[in-house]
């Protein structure tokens, strides 16, 4: 008999990807009720919604889910921040491109 928990991905209504743990025989569709692994909620950073979701998903994709991951991946956290803000930088650039001289 299989023991332990397995990691699955849950995507919430805002589009954030979360790592969760489920029992071995639970369907992936139960991920919403699984034990959260991470990333931690970022709401306390006060970022605009789109940037918060982008940063959250960048951290998820880089496997920075726990404090231990964060301690080992400080440079990856900085890269995740840059990648999340790059989306907004492109949108700002588009605003300038739309200006007429």
Image (cartoon, rainbow, N blue to C red):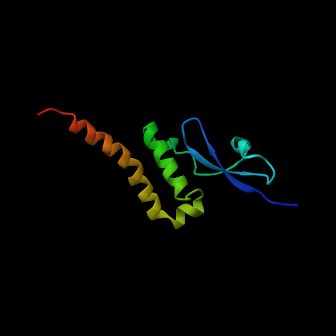
Tell how many labels. Answer: 0
- Quarter of the rendering occupied by the N terminus: bottom right
State the residue lying farthest toward the top.
100
Please tell me which residue is depicted at 58% across the width and 51% down the height of the picture: 39
Which residue is rendered at x = 53% and y = 64% of the image? 71
**Residue 26 rendering spot, x and y as whole percentages:** 79, 48
Q: Nearer the viewer, residue 64 or 47?
A: 64
Q: Is residue 82 above or below residue 11?
A: below
- The percent position of residue 6, horizontal first and vertical second, equals 73, 56
| Residue at image point 47% right, 43% down | 52
Q: Residue at x 72, y 46 (%)?
A: 28
At which x and y percent is residue 99?
A: 18, 33
Asked where in the image residue 78 lies, by quadrant, the reply is bottom left
Query: Which quadrant holds residue 51?
Result: top left
Quadrant of residue 30 in the image?
top right
Q: Is residue 3 above or below residue 92?
A: below
Residue at the extreme bottom: 72
Left/right placement of residue 28 relative to residue 78 reads: right
Percent of width and height locating residue 60: 55, 53
Q: Is residue 95 left or right of residue 28?
A: left
Q: Is residue 9 visible?
A: yes
Farthest residue toward the left? 101
Any part of residue 47 in sight: no
Does 63 sit above or below residue 16? Answer: below
- Quadrant placement of the C terminus: top left
Q: Is residue 62 left or right of residue 85?
A: right
């Amino acid at each position: 008999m299989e023991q332990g928990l397995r990691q699955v991905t849950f995507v919430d209504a805002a589009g954030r990807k979360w790592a969760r743990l489920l029992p071995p025989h639970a369907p992936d569709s139960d991920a919403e009720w699984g034990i959260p692994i991470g990333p931690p909620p970022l709401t306390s950073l006060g970022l605009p919604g789109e940037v918060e979701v982008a940063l959250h998903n960048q951290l998820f994709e880089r496997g920075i889910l726990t404090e231990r991951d964060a301690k080992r991946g400080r440079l990856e956290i900085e890269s995740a921040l840059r990648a999340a803000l790059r989306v907004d930088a492109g949108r700002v650039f588009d605003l300038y491109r739309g200006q007429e001289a």
